[in-house]
Image (tube, grey):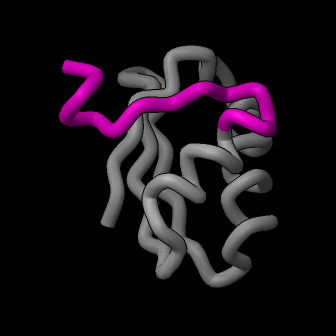
């Protein structure tokens, strides 16, 4: 599982866009979002770098949660 901080994710529409970006890369991915903390937990077989690139391409620059603290 990967955990990311997504600072620009502020509403349900943002979470939907983030979810769509990841599911486009990996349709089997499971995404759990926390809008209050602007974080997501992703279960995916895709590499972390590919997930981060998909989020960035969708306009949501993210960092692994350990780096964002």
Residue at left 51%, top 30%?
A: 62
Residue 5, percent from left and from top: 40, 30
Residue at left 76%, top 52%?
A: 21
Is 40 inside the magenta-drawn segment?
no
Left or right for 52, reference 27: left
Q: Quadrant of residue 14?
A: top right
Q: Which sits in the foreground, 38 or 59?
A: 59
Residue at left 31%, top 66%?
A: 1
In the displayed structure, 11 sits above or below 23; it is: above
Residue 12, percent from left and from top: 70, 32
Left or right for 68, reference 13: left
Is 67 inside the magenta-drawn segment?
yes
Query: In this picture, which residue range is highlighted in magenta?
Result: 56-69
In the displayed structure, 32 sits above or below 57; it is: below
Q: Which sits in the foreground, 14 or 47?
A: 47
Q: Quadrant of residue 29?
A: bottom right
Question: In which quadrant is the C terminus drawn?
Answer: top left
């Amino acid at each position: 599982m990967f955990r990311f901080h997504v600072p620009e994710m502020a509403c349900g529409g943002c979470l939907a866009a983030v979810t769509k970006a990841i599911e486009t890369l990996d349709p089997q991915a499971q995404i759990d979002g926390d809008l209050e903390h602007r974080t997501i937990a992703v279960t995916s077989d895709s590499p972390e770098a590919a997930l981060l690139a998909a989020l960035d391409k969708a306009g949501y620059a993210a960092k692994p949660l350990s780096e964002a603290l």
